[in-house]
Image (cartoon, rainbow, N blue to C red):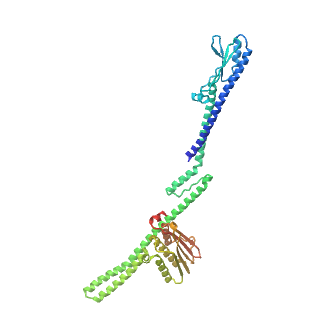
Amino acid sequence: MKGRLLAIVVGILGLGLVGGAAIILHNARQATVEEIQANLDFSQRLVGFLMADLSGPRTSDALAVLSRAFEDLRHVQVEIETDAGQWHTLTPTMPADPAPDWFERLIVPPTHEFATILFASGSDLGRIRITARIEDEIAEVWRDVFDLFWLAVWILASVCVLTYLGLWFGLKPLRDLHAGFERLEAGDFSAPVCGPAVAELADTQVKFNHVVAVLRDATRQRRLLTQKLVGMQEEERRAIARELHDEMAPYLFGIRSDVQAITWALGRDDKDSALQRVTAIQAHVGLLQQRIKRLLNRLRPAVLDDFGLRDSLSYLVEDWQTRLPEIDWQLDMDGLDDDLDDAVRVTVYRAVQECLTNVARHAQARCVQISLQVVGAGGDRGLAIEVVDDGRGMGEDTPLGLGLTGLQERVAALGGRFRLLRNAGRGVTLSLFVPLVASPAEIDAR
């Protein structure tokens, strides 16, 4: 940006200098020709006047008078013819550094000629010749143009330096923002962009700091959610391990004992005792099947695969209606179908299951309303889930339990939204929005 702005400034100044140089050279060309012609005319009148006064024999005093008269003439050369036919210069020679040839041709083209004025006096003074001294005038113009050129160079350099310094200080907020983005890229959200900013970037700086704060909170929240999720997984594994050890292991030990007893009974030809042991084994197997079914339902609701989402939710609400008939359970599934992604179906079922479990345990509600509705169209199509109860509600400082934390993580993994309204003393409203996507790639895109 600094380079582009400097290029613009240099370009504008360069065009101005080129235009100014063209004007100066045009005026200098006209002024040079006019001044030389004026000097020639003046010298012609002066010589005519002096020669009229100096009629008579040539004397040294007469030549001295002529020489003093022509001392102040500029850019012309006055010469007088001697007795030997040679020309004696009356005007002093002005030493000057000559201008370059290209500049002389630029100011006075070679095709331009100045007339040489020749006087033939009636006295012994002889003839007088006046010639334009073009190189002196051009040398003066060259010195002026040369001085103006270096002045312009100094001004251009000064403007460039001041512009660069102004841009360097003015763009410092952008450098601070760049450094802030580099910190964000490195995962450092602890240092927002500080310091004064120009008015045009102040709002951007404020919004950037707000984004940093949001990312910092989101990162911290995600870390906490990850820790809670890991804790939930470990707790679930411990619960499964306890169930396998405390409930299934005794049944398996009992079956093993019954098999050993059957072997002994058959060895004694005691069929009644063997049949009793077979009946005990059948009872143990039935109990094992119940425990395994309950464990599998915790890991994956098999009812979804057997009956679909609509019927599974209906059975779930009916089950709670049977357990807690004093609560009015209302289920509305307007437009809900079973043609959904498996991850969405499991998430929706677990969400409703977790909400109903929390209501039954903590809410002390009289009425629960469960609403599932397909909203939007195309890429914005999604399933809106809302569970509202009229229980005692939740305080603002009440932390989320493991169940709601896991649900929030599930919904976030699908690119959805999680919203919990804590109406202390007036129930709780949980609103979820789950996008209805068709593939994991679309989930990652969201």
In percent of width and height, residue 145 lies at 62, 32
Residue found 30% across the figure and 82% down from its top: 259
Which one is in front, 402 or 128? Answer: 128
Q: Is residue 345 left or right of residue 32?
A: left
How far from the left and from the top, in percent, is residue 359? 52, 77
285 up-or-down from 64: above or below? below
Camera-nearest residue between 253 and 350? 350
Q: Position of residue 171 (x, y in %)?
A: 58, 49
Residue 364 visible in the snapshot:
no
Residue 312 at x, y percent in the picture: 46, 78
Q: Which residue is pictured at 37% across the width and 78% down the height?
A: 248
Work out whether residue 197 or residue 442 is closer to the camera in this orientation and state it: 442
Above or below, 281 against 173 in this view is below
Q: Residue at point 61% right, 34% down? A: 149
Res. 397 image quadrant: bottom right
Q: Residue furthest bottom?
A: 272
When asked about the image quadrant of residue 392, the answer is: bottom right
Residue 298 visible in the snapshot:
yes
Could you tell whether 143 is left or right of 53 in the image? left
Task: Please tell me how many numbered marks the rendered image carries.
Answer: 0
